Image (spheres, rainbow, N blue to C red):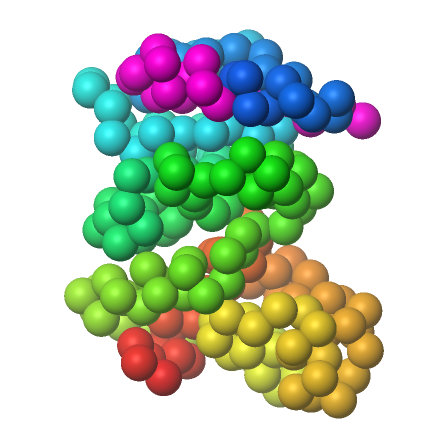
Amino acid sequence: MTIKVLLADDQALVRAGFRSLLARSRDITVVGEAQDGDEAVRLAASTHPDVILMDIRMPGTDGITATRRIVTDPTTLGCRVIILTTFDTDEHVFAALRAGASGFLTKEVEPAELRRAVAAVAGGDALLSPGVTRRVIEQFAHRQDLTPSAGQRLAALTARELETVKLVALGLSNNEIAERLVISPLTAKTHITRAIAKLNVRDRVQLVILAYESGLIRPGA
């Protein structure tokens, strides 16, 4: 199955570079290019991409606002967004993840890693680089007030599901979670899938954010 990708960046050379890198994969096709957030929203609605590579800083409507509009629009709910940034410590990355992005990459990403990331997100995965994503979330989570409603939502989980969510928030992979809990990787994945459904979140990234906002995990834990 071909993965449809939309590129959103205000620099034409950057878009051309990513298009060239993605063209090396027979399973990926670029269905459009946007130079600002508004155009990205419009093209997402008309081309229905599987993945959007979204620059976080664009003139006019930025990548954060565009991401929020795309992931909450019923006509583009299937679109997943990967945020592009120059620095992995960019404070705006955290806001983008909270807005519904499925992960992020720096613009210095290696070609093979870019293609793997696109395939992973298209397949439903999210935390592209657990350690780095967790570090970004942790770095800025302490600036956010705890959300009581977030803690209340966790009450819907079983004890094992809650334990699994905590390990996801600590940056562990499915295999590492399975080893820690002495279960199979498939069972670990099932716990995560059920937690995502019960908590009504999009993916693992949103699980991590919820874990911090609820106080289940504290920055520096």
Q: Tell me which segment is drawn in magenta.
A: 1-18
Which residue is at the front of the view, 30 or 17? 17
Q: Where 178 falls versus 100 (above or below)?
A: below
State the image quarter where residue 152 is shown.
Answer: bottom left
Does 14 lie within the magenta span? yes
Quarter of the rendering occupied by the C terminus: bottom left
Q: Position of residue 194 (x, y in %)?
A: 69, 65
Q: Quadrant of the N terminus?
A: top right
State how many labels appear.
0
- Residue under the image location 30 percent in, 34 percent down: 56
Q: Is residue 204 left or right of residue 65?
A: right
> Could you say where residue 111 lies in the image, as x and y percent from the top left?
55, 34
**Seen in the image, is 167 located left or right of residue 90?**
right
- x and y percentages locating residue 37 in the rendered image: 33, 21
In the picture shown, does residue 105 fall above or below 139? above
The answer to which quarter of the image holds residue 17 is top left
Q: Is residue 64 visible?
A: no
Task: Report if residue 16 lies within the magenta region.
Answer: yes
Please state the horizontal and vertical placement of residue 215, each as a whole percent of the image: 35, 78
Establish if 58 lies above or below 138: above
The structure residue drawn at horizontal position 50% and vertical position 28%, both measured from the top left corner, is 52
Give the image quarter of residue 9. Answer: top left
Residue drawn at x 59%, y 16% is: 30
Q: Is residue 83 left or right of residue 202?
A: left
Pick the front one: 131 or 218:
131
